[in-house]
Image: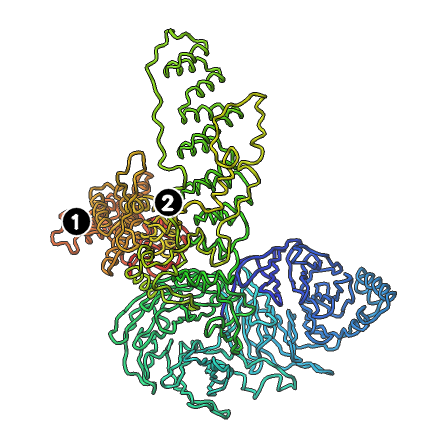
Amino acid sequence: MLTKFETQSNRVKGLAFHPNRPWILASLHNGSIQLWDYRMGTLIDRFDEHEGPVRGVHFHPSQPLFVSGGDDYKIKVWNYKLRRCVFTLGGHLDYIRTVFFHHESPWIVSASDDQTVRVWNWQNRSCLSILTGHNHYVMCAQFHPLEDLIVSASLDQTIRVWDISSLRQRSPAGGDAPGDMQIRGLINQARGNIPAAVNADIFGTGDAVVKYLLEGHSRGVNWVSFHPTLPLIVSGADDRQVKLWRISETNAWEVDTFRGHLNNVSSTLFHPRQDLVISNGEDKTIRVWDQNRRTCLHTFRKESDRFWILAVHPTINLIAAGHDTGMIVFKLQRERPPFAVSEGNLFFVKESYIRSMSFETARDSPLLMIQRNSSQGVGSAYGGSLGDMYGGQSDAPPAQTTPARSMSYNAQEHCVLLNHVSNGGTYELYFLPRGAGGVSGDTPAEPRKGEGVGACFVGRNRIAVLDRARNNILIKDLHNETTKRVKCLLPGADWLFPAGVGYVLVKNEEKVILQDLQQKKIVAEISAVNVKYVVWSDDMSRVALLGKHILVIATRRLEHLATVHETVRIKSAAWDESGVIVYSTLNHLKYCLPNGDNGIINTLKDPVYITRVRGPAVCYIDRNAIPGIFAIDPTEYAFKLMLLRKRYDDVRKMISENRLCGKAIIAYLQRKGFPEVALHFVRDERTRFNLAVDSGAIDIALEAAQELDEPEIWSTLAGAALKLGNIDVVELCYQRTKDLERLAFLYVLLGDREKAAKMANIAESRRNFMAKFQICMYLGDVEGALSVLAECGQLALARVMAKAHGLTDMIKELGGDEDGATTVAKGKLLPRPLPLSGEQSWPTLPVTRGLFTKDPHAEDFEEITGDYYEDAAALEASERERERGGWGEEERGALGKQPATTTVDPFAQELDQPKSPAVITGGDGWGDDLDDFDFGGAEVQTPAPAQTGGDDFEVDAVEQAVQMKDYFVPPPPGPGVTVRWTRSAKLVGDLVAAGAFDDAMKLLSRQIGCKSFSAFEDVFRTVYLGCRASVPGIINMPSPMVHMSRGVDQPKVAVTLESVTNLVHSARDSFAARKFNDAKTLFSAVAASVPLLVLGTDKEVKDAVDMLSSSREYLLALACDRCRNEAKAAGNTVREVQLAAMFTHCELLPAHKVLALRTAMKIAFDAKCFIFASGFARRLIDGNPNPPAQALKMIQYCDQNMTNAHEVDYDDRRDFVVEASQLVPLYAGQPRKDCSYCKAKYQPESAGSTCALCEIGSVGFSAEGLRVKTS
């Protein structure tokens, strides 16, 4: 039984699969109805209107409806789209056991404890017929899937088959006149409100008649159901038997009885696609019966829960069972057909043949007829199926024809290996016929069989098989004879995968290793949980490890490249010729790049298994072993791959062809640092503006700002343009926002006194005296500043300022006395800075090429090609060659070649876009309202403006300069040092040094299952600051930052193995000096520092892991001592002795272990636990050449008093480890969970919590494993 989904809830009494969607309804004993998505494992909705248990539930085959019936005597019809009950049908007088929709007519059949079966019309909400005749509770009633029949089962030990053809003949759909329909509705309504006995007397019982009465059970019958295609009925009863019945046109009889249940049979039904009967019962078992041989094939037992209900999916091989504590969705066997791909051919098993299909011609031909595995088919015992025996037809395959687990193909010898998991693991070797024709006839070929798992080819004539019992790898020849035995170097290995000549991949539940069979050593290993399949690229350079919900991509030497986690099951994968892995899940076809970027290609209606990917074509094989092919659009992942491999010419070509769209691409480009590329996919002006600002495309940002025309947008654009030195755009933005202070300061910096003076006049007209005073001080206009002070009423300050600058006439005008008492030192204004140039933007650095635009005048100019997948190494080599030997700008000018056209946007010319935005002037740069200031009738005296040919504020000149590109634009900044560090980082330490803390924390979560990051705060800060240094800079300028690297695009990580080693030594010294608080802080720092190490050799990695293990043990010892002191203070002697004993079982240095044993010996002696004290004393003596005399005396004394005054949970004669949470012994054989990081041991109850020792890892979490090695 392969479990697909399981829930924990109240007792499940009813189940129903949705016919099309991956949904299942579960009705519970507490009155709730749950709607689950069994594929995603999520609860979709919950319906709570019934009062009491809900025993029956069923989906409508085509409408968004389901029906339910419960102990409140009500039948409710629900609309799951509206998420509410549509209406309620009343009429039953007791508990309702089952409800089912009819497959065609608008009918519902219900069975009740009121001893009746009722048929309802859910469209007019009336009762059509009441079927009476049972004299006890009716436990089940169902429609026939094809005919007008109903079958019912009752506790009166009978099964009744009812003929309801008269209901169809007189139904409204049969052609009744409108008046007849109205009368019929009134009669039905009346019948539904009259008791059954009175109803039968008044209306008669001609609507439905009993066609067959089946008797044979000795106790009450709990369930009955029809076969989907054959004239068969199966029933289960309290007599612990499952009976098979045959019906014909005139008669019905019992065919056989299935015996094996040990308690009441709750439910039974036919498998819709195979010749099987499935039943469950109160004996806590689900049993699968072969309906041809009438034998029990499988028994699935649940230890503590009784089963109550069964349901099968009508089209998919899924079964659901409800029990006391929830439900389980499962299938009986694997449906993945075994297949192998080699040299353009697909080899697969279909039915009883090994077949071959050419990918080029799509020709499918059988090669060899094979034997069924001994654990598979059992359907031939009676010479055929039940359909053959009774004249019916059945499309179901023979019972339990389980396919092989995997197939391996040998191209040199033209033979295949089939692996089976039955009987502990077996394999079969078949030699395929050479030539065009296959083997004819019905005689299966005789294979060469053997025992073992994971059989695969490791050479032209060699097979490797895993012997799990002896943990050996057997090397066999093609005659199936063992030639060599190699020790498997991975404990707990459970499968082998091929890895080339002389190598195998060996996996267990936690990791995969690459083992060399010749040298008998481990070449490499990688952490990967429960790997199911392995897919190699065509050149064997990369491998994909497929787990249940995980995809790991690695190199040939198992160097980790990327990991993808999925919430649904991963089914298959294949490598594209470009190096992209395309994989399928239950409902999607997805891709993953070598760097881990992934996405969805399209949605799948049914699961498929990918066999090959070539360009836009995906070849697959489905669960029915039918090969197929469908087209995909690889543009998205090809585009991302080109960005990854720096094929910028091809990126530009794809953009020019408008082959990409979607917000996902825009977000991806922005996240990866290519906003200038994302700019060409955006039509929303606000998004265009943000991307243009990020990429430095000021002209596009200006165009978007004019469309938006918001103050915040202009302010943002002004800041971006100022960084790039685009003064004209800065001036235009300040004018649009009417920012007088910034605009005046800009004019002062540019040396434009006339415009600055005009800003002072505008400030005065607005009565913004502070702004005018500031501008006057910028310009050195003392008289203007005095007028501002006077107008503001600050006459005293004005007189002081006038006297300081020697303006005696102004003193008198201000009402002061020239010879007054005020004494002011002779003052003068500071000299104004002289601008170097006021005519152009700065800096004067032309932009000739963009990030993706190659210079067409270069000697090595390369035309755009369609090769989207050029190798990155070759591309980088060509770029280095161009930089060494190519012509520079000066040489091209000397040779008479024209320089490249200056352009802001490298894509503008390629895409026929405007070279510069058209600025919509509309008058002045600040708008037409600047001339409409109300000055109160006073004339404003202004200096004579310069002759500029525009208006007073030069706005037209500014916009003309913007349009004419009369300025230089610096290139957009390339990726900085930290960006390059982040892109090349593969380890946590590199990411932290680069400042990519989010990425570092995500990597820590995957590698070590980090649950709390608070312990990393100090070490993150140390690593981040440790690779940066500030050097003295120019006066009034910030100090430049220097980034320290250890190589090309790799940061220097401050946390080194030497520094961690020093931390360990300091912590041990503090421990020996009994400075336990300091020791805990230092050991915690060691645990937080190890994941950030960047090491180069395996020995260094081993040393780091050893230091982590040592820190864990010391932290455990410190926790024991701390809790011991608390127990001592509380007077808990038993706990004090136990914790002292736990202290001695921590792996400490010998000197520290002696201190722990002496402490425990004294505590045990003081507590009069002489047996424990004697044990500690003996451990002190063992291995000690100079045993302490105190220990010898303790042994002599305790041997005379071999008693313990207290019962303590501590037995040093048994193997145990110290549980890190409760600090109690965890003996061998007891269940335990490990910390995902430090591997501390915990009880299962602690699963999901943060480790109490390292305060980093998660208890019970299965992580990839710590990775600190660079290669």
Provide the residue designation for mark 2. Answer: 844
Query: Do the numbered discs 2 and 1 sit on residues whose CB atoms are within 8 Å?
Result: no
Label 2 neighbourhood size at 10 Å, few (<14), some (14-19), many (20+)?
A: few
Residue 1248 drawn above or below residue 938: below
For residue 208, side relative to residue 1217 (left or right): right
Provide the residue designation for mark 1. Answer: 1191
Q: Residue furthest right?
A: 179
Tag count in the figure? 2
Specify the quadrant of the image occupied by residue 112: bottom right
Place of residue 338 in the rendered image (x, y in percent of width and height, measured from the top left): 46, 77
Place of residue 1126 in the rendered image (x, y in percent of width and height, measured from the top left): 32, 40
| Nearer the observer, 182 or 984 | 984
Which residue lies at the image location 45% right of the left edge and 12% below the top edge? 814
Label 1 neighbourhood size at 10 Å, few (<14), some (14-19), many (20+)?
A: many
Q: Residue furthest bottom?
A: 441
| Nearer the observer, 401 or 1095 | 1095
Which residue lies at the image location 45% right of the left edge and 74% below the top edge? 612
What is the C-alpha distance between the residues marked 2 and 1? Answer: 87 Å
